[in-house]
Image (spheres, rainbow, N blue to C red):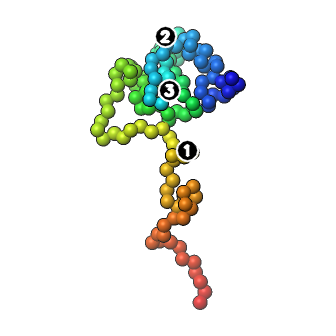
Amino acid sequence: MLKAIFTWWNGATIGVLFTIGRRGAFVGQDEFGNRYYEARDNKDSYDQRKRRWVTFKGYAEASKVPPDWHGWLHHTFEAPPTVEPLLRRAWEKDYLPNLTGTVEAWRPAGSLARTGERPAATGDYQAWRPE
């Protein structure tokens, strides 16, 4: 309960949930469990457009928002992906959130987090030794 009151990085705070519950309408949910809302009117708008919110499932990390929902949140697309899905090209890779700092993060050969030994390179430094 205290996490919901005082920390924003563990999900939405009580104040945000109260505001969304009072002012917003549920629009949809993505494959990561994040939930998306839109204001019922533009009463508290900054630019005469309805405000849009996301409540993250788990840790609040902006890279957990898929591209189609990101476009909707920033008013690039008027209709949400639940109504008009984003056209998917054959050459596009599946979306992954930022994995930095996680177990699944990429670690190159020679990284201390991997083996700590890097392969030899042709331009490696050779220390001078007096003869």
91 or 72: nearer the viewer: 91
57 or 121: nearer the eye? 57
Quarter of the image with the N terminus in it? top right
Q: Which mark is residue 102?
A: 1
Residue under numbered circle 3? 34
Query: Identity of the amino acid at label 2?
Result: Arg
Q: Which residue shows up at 41% across the image and 37% down it?
A: 95
Tell me which corner region of the image, top left, top right, bottom left or bottom right, holds residue 57.
top right
Number of residues whose C-alpha sits closer than 10 Å to that of mark 1, classed few (under 14), some (14–19) or many (20 or more): few
**Disc 3 to disc 1, how far (Cα)?**
19 Å
CA gap between label 2 and label 1 equals 37 Å
> What residue appears at the point 63 percent right and 23 percent down from the top-left corner?
13
**Secondary-structure class at tag 3:** loop
Task: Identify the secondary structure beneath mark 2.
Answer: loop
Q: Secondary structure at mark 1?
A: loop
What residue did someone put label 2 on?
40
* First-in-chain label (3 vs 2): 3
Between discs 3 and 1, the one toward the N terminus: 3
